[in-house]
Image (cartoon, helix red, strand yellow):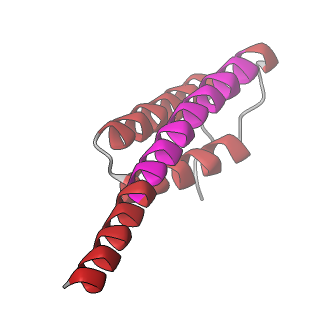
Amino acid sequence: MARVMSEQEWADAVAEQVRALEAAAIATDWSGAELCTTSLAALLAAPPGTDRAHTEAVFMHAYQAVGRVSAAARAAHDEVRAELQQLASSRKVVAAYG
């Protein structure tokens, strides 16, 4: 049987996952970020709920971190897409004149 976390243990676990998520994003380790997001979602799905204001603050901190990481992921995706489009254009030029 799993032990129920205290409010502080839960908040610490969420903060740890947020740090890991942000570190993965900084390292552009999107697979690692996805794993952190899955763990974070599981933690946020089961808050102890004893201190509502503290729980809300923990949720807001996690929400803001996920927003920052999502923005970084979108930016990285856009950069890769632009690079792939440039490569495709270059290949067309080479094929036309090669």
- Given residues 67 and 84, the one toward you in this image is 84
**Placement of 45 over or under 69, stated as above or below:** below
**Magenta residues?**
54-80
Which residue is at the far top? 53
Which residue is at the far left? 98
Give the quarter of the image for residue 70.
Answer: top right
Q: Quadrant of the C terminus?
A: bottom left
| Percent x, y of residue 40 | 56, 45
| Percent x, y of residue 33 | 43, 50
| Percent x, y of residue 52 | 80, 20
- Left or right position of 57 against 30: right
- Given residues 77 and 67, the one toward you in this image is 77
Q: Quadrant of the N terminus?
A: bottom right
> What residue is rendered at 72% in x and 34% in y?
48
- Left or right position of 14 against 33: right
Which residue is at the far front? 97
> What residue is rendered at 72% in x and 23% in y?
55
| Percent x, y of residue 72 | 47, 39
What secondary structure prevails in the magenta region? helix
The total number of labels drawn is 0
**Placement of 31 over or under 41, stated as above or below:** below
> What residue is rendered at 48% in x and 46% in y?
73
Q: Is residue 71 magenta?
A: yes
Q: Is residue 62 magenta?
A: yes
- Given residues 6 and 94, the one toward you in this image is 94
